[in-house]
Amino acid sequence: MNHVDSPAHGTVSPYEGESVLTTTRVPRIPPLPPAEWPPVLRSLLADSHRDGPGRENLFGTLAHHPVLAHAWLSLARVLTHEGTLGHRRRELIVLRVAHRLDAPYVYRRHRTPAADAGLTDAEIDATGADLDAHAWAGEDSDLLEAADLLAVNSPVPEGLWGRLARVLSPGQLVELLVLAGQTATMCATLNTLHTPSDQQPSLVVRLDRERCCSAGQCVGAAPEVFEQDEEDGRVTLLVPEPDARCADEVRFAADLCPSGAITLVDDEEPARS
């Protein structure tokens, strides 16, 4: 089982299919419980349930600065519900920036909105991989390339800008830049503060059947999660997100795999080099 560097250019993040073992860290600024939030913040959360779960610790962190929290969440509401980019474009940008900045809180949180926006499971997974690993359509490819550059404050070349300007209005181009910046700021904030996900830490299992050498040791170690195909001998993944009670067995199975076909991603923490 391989360990992963943080996703600067030339390195690989846990979303690209490399396995990682992590330990839980204590938040540097613990999120405030809802009972201690100002009324306006509780109202914002109540009014935004349509955006899905997974934001209580985010709101609780921002609650330490109520004025900033209101301004920040007002901007987020505009980008989410009053923007003109469209849901699919927005989620592509958010997922890619979160991937580039190794921000599992944001990446995990936006998988569901991305699916609701029409992205397939394969496309969502591909936002956390090398862009050449998926057959992205022209506009999608340009948006993701721009997200890569904006996430690390690199210049957007004229050729790419020209392609974006042919399909986006001036207002949409401004929105694209603000969205990428807002996402990057939130990723940096939550990463630096070690803000935990609202969800319990979960282990995501990915299996590359093309690399499987049919040794079957994983099946013996974790039969609830892996099964060996009777026809070709390769292993099939039964449970992509196994119960926490199976975590030790699954990690052992990944360690045993001689071909490195099993990838484990702990969604709670970013990988560190």
Image: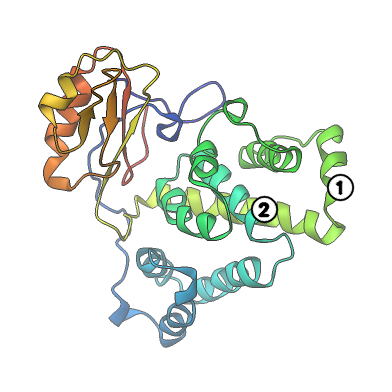
Where, quadrant-wise, is the C terminus in this rendering? top left
Where, quadrant-wise, is the N terminus in this rendering? top left
Task: Judge by depth and name the residue closer to the eye, 90 or 73.
Answer: 90
Q: In the image, what residue occupies the spot 11% across and 27% down?
A: 221
Picture coordinates of residue 190, whole percent (x, y): 42, 53
Rounded to the nearest angstrom, the CA distance separating label 2 from label 1 is 14 Å
Q: Residues within 10 Å of mark 2 (few under 14, many from 20)?
A: some
Element type at mark 2:
helix
Element type at mark 1:
helix
Picture coordinates of residue 60, whole percent (x, y): 36, 69
Task: Return the disc, 2 or 1, that comes first in the chain's sequence.
Answer: 2
> Label 1 amino acid?
Ala
Q: Which residue is mark 1?
A: 165
Colour scheme of the rendered structure: rainbow
Q: Which residue is mark 2?
A: 89
Picture coordinates of residue 266, whole percent (x, y): 30, 40
Picture coordinates of residue 249, whole percent (x, y): 12, 33
Q: In the image, what residue occupies the spot 23% across and 18% down?
A: 257
Q: Residues within 10 Å of mark 1 (few under 14, many from 20)?
A: few
